[in-house]
Every structure is written in structure tokens, then in C-alpha cells.
Image: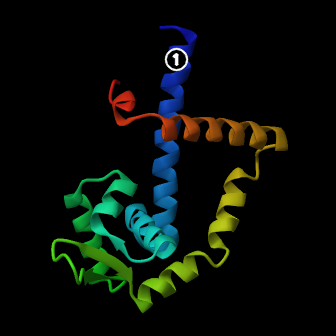
Amino acid sequence: MSEKDQLLKQLYGNMSSMRRQMSLRMQDEYGLPASQCEILFLVNHEGPTPLKDLAKAMQLTPGAITQLVEALERAGYVERIPSKTDRRITTIGLTEAGLVKVARSHSGKKKDFFEHVFGTLSVEELQTMNTIQRKIIAFLSNSNSSDTKES
């Protein structure tokens, strides 16, 4: 195995580990699974959002989104809004409780947590990380879905 292959394997493991740890922290901090938090943040940012758009944004199946939305609906954080023009379309909006939950999440905790996690990095390391993230985002934004399915 080449050095590059070994590094790619380590990076994949590191990213998976970071994602798991961040998800656990979000669950501890907000009392919801990370995927449910993501739905709340997306709907808060975008406004009422069709289920199919949530599925696309989160790269999940419509069935998985339905389960997540049902849990948020039972908790009283979101509501389904039927389309007035097409009954096949259901939009998800935040309830008052959902707005309060998101407002509490954005009340500085997120920023403090982010600064705590990345505060150990030097300015040079942060600049390098920022450059790498922008490069990856640009690649992913310009790639079509078949490029990513080859692996």
C-alpha cells in the first residue's frame, strides 16, 4: 500500500471518527440526534421546506427523512404543511417550540463549542484546514453524482 493510500485510509477513519464525536456532542448539547438537529437548522435557515428538498440536502432517502420528521413532529418541533396546489407535496415548518429550540442552539453555544474544538489549532493550521475544506467543497460542488459513485 502506497503512502498516499495509507494517508487516505487514515483521513477516512479520522473523518468518520470526527463525525461520530460531533454527533454525540450535538446529541448531548441539544438533546436530539444530530440528524434531527440538522433538519431543524435547515428548516430554520431555508424556511418551510418540502420533504423531498430535505432528503436531497441531507442525502437521505425520503423514508429516512419521513422517520426523522415524524420524531420531530411528535416532539412538537415541526409541523407538516400540505401544499395548497399539489397534495403530493408536504412542506415542513418549525413550530414555536422548534423556533425556541433553534434559538437556544444558536445562542452562542455552537460558536463556543466550535472555538473550543478548533482552538487548539494554530493560525497556520486553521488556514491550511480552511484552504483544504474550500478545495473539497469546490470539487464536490463541481462533480456530478457518477464521479462519487465510482468508489
| Residue in view at x 43 percent, y 91 percent | 96
Q: Residue furthest top?
A: 1
Q: Position of residue 34 (x, y in %)?
A: 43, 62
The answer to whether 122 is drawn above or below residue 38 in the figure is: above
Label 1 Cα crowd, 10 Å radius (few <14 / some 14-19 / many 20+): few
**Above or below 65: residue 130:** above
Q: Residue at x 53, y 36 (%)?
A: 14
Q: Which residue is mark 1?
A: 6
Position of the C terminus by quadrant = top left
Residue 109 locus on image (x, y percent): 64, 72
Q: Is residue 75 left or right of residue 115?
A: left
Residue drawn at x 36%, y 36% as measured from the top left? 145
Quarter where residue 85 is shown: bottom left
67, 51: nearer the viewer: 51
SS of the residue under disc 1: helix
- Looking at the image, which is closer to me, 81 or 15? 81
Residue type at mark 1? Answer: Gln
The residue lying at 43 percent from left, 73 percent from top is: 43
